[in-house]
Every structure is written in structure tokens, then in C-alpha cells.
Amino acid sequence: MNVVEQAEYETSSTEETKPTFYSRFRKYIHLACWLIITGFLCAAYALQIPKGYNQELLVLGLIYLYITLFLFFCYVPTTIITNPWNYVVGSISDIICKRFSHRVRTIAWAIIVIAVIVITVFSFPEKEESPRLRRLIALVGFFVFIFGTYITSVHRKAVQWNTITTAIFMQFVLALFVFRCSVGHDIFQWLSTFAESYLHYSWFGSDFVFGDTAANSGVFAITVFPAIIFFASTVQMLYYVGAVQWIIKKLSVIFVTLLDVSGAESIVTIAAPFLGSCENALLIEPLIKDLTKSEIHMVLTCGFATISGSVLYGYMAMGVSGEALLTSCIMSIPCSIAVSKLRYPETEESIAKHMKVIPTYSASGETTNILHAAGKGAKVGIEIVFLIMANLISLLALLYAFNGFLTWLGNFLTIENLTLQLITGYVFVPIAWLIGADDKDLVSVGRLMAIKIWANEFVAYQEMITTYKGLLSVRSQLVATYALCGFANFGSVGMQVGVLSTLAPTRSGDISRLAISALICGSISTWLSASVAGMLN
């Protein structure tokens, strides 16, 4: 039995227990739920459609579609769709492969993708806040980041350009769907509003525990931390009912098919926006010790390239655009794959390539019911809260201590307020220009990017909303929001290395050696997302 089979066996085998009421009448319960939901949808549409279109009707239909597909495929194998699809795609592929060589196909696909991106970017009418010159700069920056990553690739000859090109195309299409499609804009705007209003319910828990005065004080810890605990509980409950696993499994199949990455990589990458840069690795815990170096690099990169849903409300509470944050999280999935595989392509044989089982995400033991899941989620949430708090206290203290030392040295040279952010902020000015920030804001955006690297994105967003409030143009603030949306900072390096080394002690050396490279790739992923936002805004 190989490692993948053993992992699947261990995660899928359970002790024999007495059937519960739900398991005995599962089919009838599902049918009753679907009929009730269908009746509700019909009644809602009959009453609301005459009043005209609104976002709520669209989202309600999408939720109904998700529930219907989820229940349908609980009893019907997905092969009824995948087999015909694979047959059609396979037939077309055979025809193309017989007529053209692999190199010709790769070059042709790359040219098509580049042509689509360029034509699309410049086909939209010019706006005052989005002139074509700025779009051109962002487009040039996009390809500069890709070319720069390729130049520093560990194995340039091993780069699979079809994977890179397809991942970039997927990122661009997702961004186009959000920025230039009314349906996509409505969906993400609703998701942003829903996430903000849903996570705001944590206020009632804060009010009960700390009192009305403290809950309304606007103190960072009291405003942000309860929402993180609340969301962690929500994720655990969704895992208990199987909703998150279903989404991850279906999306992972798509990514494995289209991008030719291993099952383990696709699962961890897709789970990163849901669970975070450390918890997502628990999904493939039995396999981490046997991952290739390229796969370990991919696991690290996807953690640095995005933020987790558990901290999402924290940024929204500061005043950061929820729509931009959500879009960035989704765009980071294919983008992190492209950048990681460009920097560290696969040269080894992966034993986790065909992994399809999604293990149960559980902090300890088996979850007995949904209330137990909520309690375990709260436990995970409080651990995340204390980790964030400890990192903020220690990193900010170290940063300001080092800044004090630099200011002391600067005084000898009559340089006032010399800080690490000031020095590295100028280093990031070219990057700020390449992502499409306005000329007057280049230094400010560069400093924000420097703060994010040296401290973390929490501090950077706080600076953007307070210190630079009203100083940045709308365009500059938008691209900065995308550029800062990731865990790519030195504090996260320690967290990821610590977690992965604990899960796979024999690979701690490889994990440590790859961490800085993955940190840079995670940063590049956020810059690419910012460039796409600069092109399409």
C-alpha cells in the first residue's frame, strides 16, 4: 500500500457505530429539505420578480443551485458529466496533438492568452481615474513580474508553460468577471456586504462579554478578535456538514485537470482562503513528509499569497474594501500556482499527484455534532487570536526599536526620522509604479508595501486607512489594497515553517530552505493581482 492509499485509508476508515436517525433517513431528509427550499424559492421569485431585478434574487438563485447540485451529486456520480466532457476534450486534443507539436501548441496558446489580455485591456473606454497609459504601465508590470520570476527560476528548462499560461488566463478571467461584468460585480459586492453584516453579529457576543461601552469603543482587539473567533466557528460547522469539503474537492479536480498540478497542491491552494496559511496544510498532513520540493514550495507560496477568511472582517472593520479583498483571495489561487511553478517547477515524481480524498479538518478527535464543531472552531479561533496578538506586539515592538536605532544613526548625518519603512519604501517605488499606482502616490504605496513585509498586512492596512486616508487617489488605494492582501511577511515565515516542520520533522530542512523563496513568490502573486486590478479598473 503506497502513501496515498494509506492516507486515504486512514482518513476514510471509521469505527463501526450505531446508525443515527439522520443516517437511516438521510434520503428522505434531503428530499424534504430540497422540496422546502424549492417552494421557498418559487414563492420568493413570484413575489419579488415583478418588483424588478436586484442582487438578492441573483444570489438566492445561486445558493439554490449550489444546494441542488450538492444534494444531487450525493446520490449521482459526477462521471455523468466528467465522462462526456473528457471524451469531447480528449477527441479535440487528439486532433490538435496529431497536427501540431507540443512546442507549437504551447507557443500558440501563450500567444492567444497574451492577445486576449492586451486586446481586452485596451478595448474598454478610457476614464479619468483609469487612463490607457496607466493600464499600459500595469500591463508592462504584469509581464515584468512574470519574466523576473522566470529569470530566477530554479529549473528554467523544466517550466511547464501550459500550466503557467492557463493559470494566468484563469486569474485574468476571474478579474474580468468582477471588474467588467455586472453579474460578477453584483455577486462579489453581495458577498462583501454579506460577509461584513454576518461577521458583525460577533458584536453581540462582545457586548455580552465586555459590555456595551467596550464593544462600541473601536479598540482594535475588541472590534476584530471576536469576529475571527466567530468565523472560525462558522468554518468548523461548515466542515461538519461537508459543505467546504465538497467545494474544495470539486474545485481541486478542475485545477488538477486544467493546470496539471498534484491533487495535494490543488487541495491546499484552494483551501488557503478558507482556512489560512497554516491550517490548510492539515488537510494533507499524512503526505507532507513525502511531498516533492516543488510541492512544498507550492504549499508555502499559496499561504503567503492570500489571506484567510478568519481575518477578513478585521480588515473590513478598518474600512478596507471587502469586494477587493474577496476578489484578491479568489485571484490568488491560480496566480500562486503560476508563480510557484515558474520559480520552482516540478522535476521529481510526485506520489500525491492523484490524491482525491479530503481529510476531515479537525483540531482534535472526532466531532460529534454541530455544536461541538462550533466549540472546536472557537478554540481554533482563540488560538489564532492569541497568535495574531503576540505577533503584533512583538513585531511592532521590534520594528519601532529598530527604527529608533536608525533614527539615532540618522541624526549624526542630519537625517530626520530615518526608519526601515522610509528606506525600503523607496526600494518598493518601482514596484508601486509597475502595479499602476498614480505618480504622486508612488512613495506612499511603496512605504505601505514595505510595512507589510516587515510587520504584517494588519499594520499596513491600518496605516493606509489612517495615516494615508484622503492622501491616496482611488486608483492608488485600490492597487495598494490588492498588493497588501496576503500573509507574505517575515512573521508568517516563522509560523508556516513551524507548523509544517511540526507536521513533517524529517523535511524541516527543505521547508526552511524554501521559505524565503516562497515568501518572495507570495509577494509577487499579490503584485500580479494588483497589476490586473490596475489594468481592468
Image (cartoon, grey):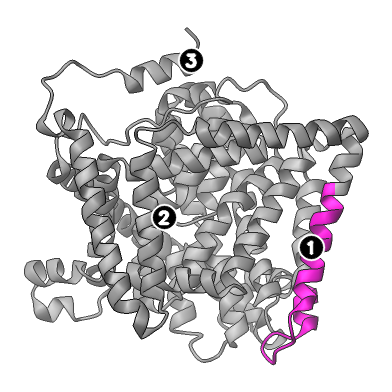
Q: Secondary structure at mark 1?
A: helix
The residue that mark 1 highlights is 116
Q: Is 161 rendered above or below residue 123?
A: above
Amino acid type assigned to the residue bearing label 2 in the image? Ser
- Which residue is pictured at 79% across the width and 76% down the height? 122
Task: Name the one closer to the observer, 223 or 283.
Answer: 283
Residue for badge 2: 308
| Rendered-image quadrant of the C terminus | bottom right
| SS label for mark 3 | helix
Q: Which residues are magenta?
A: 109-137
Q: Which quadrant of the structure image shows residue 477? A: bottom right
Please say whether residue 261 is visible from this viewpoint. no
Q: Locate residue 84: give its quadrant.
A: top right
Q: Could you say where residue 291 lies in the image, as x and y percent from the top left? A: 56, 25
Q: Amino acid at mark 3?
A: Val
Which residue lies under the disc numbered 3? 3
Foreground pick, 144 / 114: 114
The label shown at residue 35 is: none
Residue at 53% of width from left, 69% of height from top? 184
Q: Main secondary structure of the magenta part?
A: helix
